[in-house]
Amino acid sequence: MTQDAIQGLIDALPLPSLIVTQGDRIVGANARAEKLLGQGLAGRHLVTVLRHPSVLDAIEACATSHQPKTTRYLTSADRNEITYQVYCGYVELAEVQGVLVSFEDITDVEAVGQMRRDFVANVSHELRTPLTALMGFIETLQGPAQNDPVAQKRFLGIMMTEAGRMNRLVSDLLSLSQVESEERIRPSHSIDLTLLIGSTLRSIAPVADKARVKLVKEVPTDLVLVPGDEDQLRQVFTNLIENAIKYGGDDQTVTVKLTHVQRDPALRGPAVRIEVCDTGPGIDQVHLPRLTERFYRVDSHRSREMGGTGLGLAIVKHIVNRHRGRLKIDSSPEEGSRFTVILPALD
Ligand code: ADP
């Protein structure tokens, strides 16, 4: 096989690849490999190009054993860490014998794995706290409080609260997983948002009354139709309005405003905008990009105290994505918060 043929073969490979012969000399590299490791690789000695010990060891082990080897190669570009899976395979191309080294970017796969591990750790932690409390109270009821009806009543009340917390968490986890599994299925029912917002506000009214929060509805008089999933959109508005009541503080006003938009620049078409505004203490800018992450809370203690699971906005984000819409959050301390959902209008 000629040098040109080797180069032709390596150019056709979809991954950054190079061939290293005995004596650790690079005899061929494709453009992808040159982008990763630098120009003019052919003819150079391997160690002048790659100093990563585990990659050098894998290449050497492959060259001597003629067995395939894999290893990891960590590098950075534009201040981002990139992880490559490196595959080393022994090749004999006529008079050229050596190791074909290919680099696969597995950064995203690694990130997904890390997210999954974090998620499991978070769920376990969130469940363990109320579970530990429940077990502690059960022990107390079986022991010291066995004959103390007053303490029993108080402990059962706390146990109910803790069980309720676990129940909410499990319901939110189930909602999240259901919304995720349907995310690619476009909702097609025609939903009248004026009606839906009206009925959502009515069902939340007792919660608002309890916190002495005034709910204000600003909606157009005509029909406002969007293609949607009624239960999911109800969940979006419920989560946003409940948050506005919870975090906006007692004796405040929460406004829900519905408007038609002729052409939304992000959606590139006619849209409907639903704003949920509170007059509470607002949220510092640094938190805004992360608010829709699962279990992200500005103040964990306050969220738990208010019965929050830390999943409400993650659910909202997924539902809005499923509806091909956008979620915008504007807030600054002392000015209250505005959560805006923009949904494509029915054509
Ligand atoms: P939680 O169950 O904690 O309410 P969410 O996902 O609904 O979880 O909200 C995430 C965090 O965002 C909350 O813990 C809170 O810190 C913040 N947040 C949400 N809505 C508001 C709001 N209207 N005003 C101030 N902070 C808010």
Image: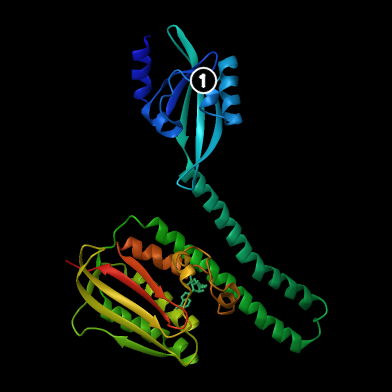
* Viewport quadrant of the N terminus: top left
Question: Foreground residue, 144 or 79?
Answer: 79
Report the number of discs.
1
Above-or-below relation of 68 to 341 = above
Tell me the SS state at disc 1: loop
Query: Measuring 44% from the left and 34% from the top, which residue is drawn there?
Result: 36
Query: Which colour style is shown?
Result: rainbow
Q: Is mark 1 within 8 Å of ligand 1?
A: no
* Viewport quadrant of the C terminus: bottom left
Q: Position of residue 4 (x, y in %)?
A: 34, 14
Query: Measuring 56% from the left and 71% from the top, which residue is drawn there?
Result: 167
Residue type at mark 1 is His
To which residue does mark 1 refer?
Answer: 45
Above-or-below relation of 1 to 108 = above
Residue 295, visible in the rendered structure: yes
Question: Foreground residue, 328 or 231?
Answer: 328
Query: Measuring 38% from the left and 22% from the top, which residue is drawn there?
Result: 10
Q: Position of residue 156 (x, y in %)?
A: 68, 81
Q: Position of residue 101 (x, y in %)?
A: 48, 24
> Image check: 199 left or right of 175?
left
Residue at the farthest right position = 144
Give the image quarter of residue 277: bottom left
Give the image quarter of residue 196: bottom left
Query: Measuring 37% from the left and 28% from the top, which residue is drawn there?
Result: 31
Question: Foreground residue, 254 or 338?
Answer: 338
Q: Position of residue 180 (x, y in %)?
A: 41, 58
Above-or-below relation of 73 to 18 = below
Question: Foreground residue, 112 or 153?
Answer: 112
Q: Residues within 10 Å of mark 1 (few under 14, many from 20)?
A: some
> Image check: 225 left or right of 237?
left
Residue 15, visible in the rendered structure: no
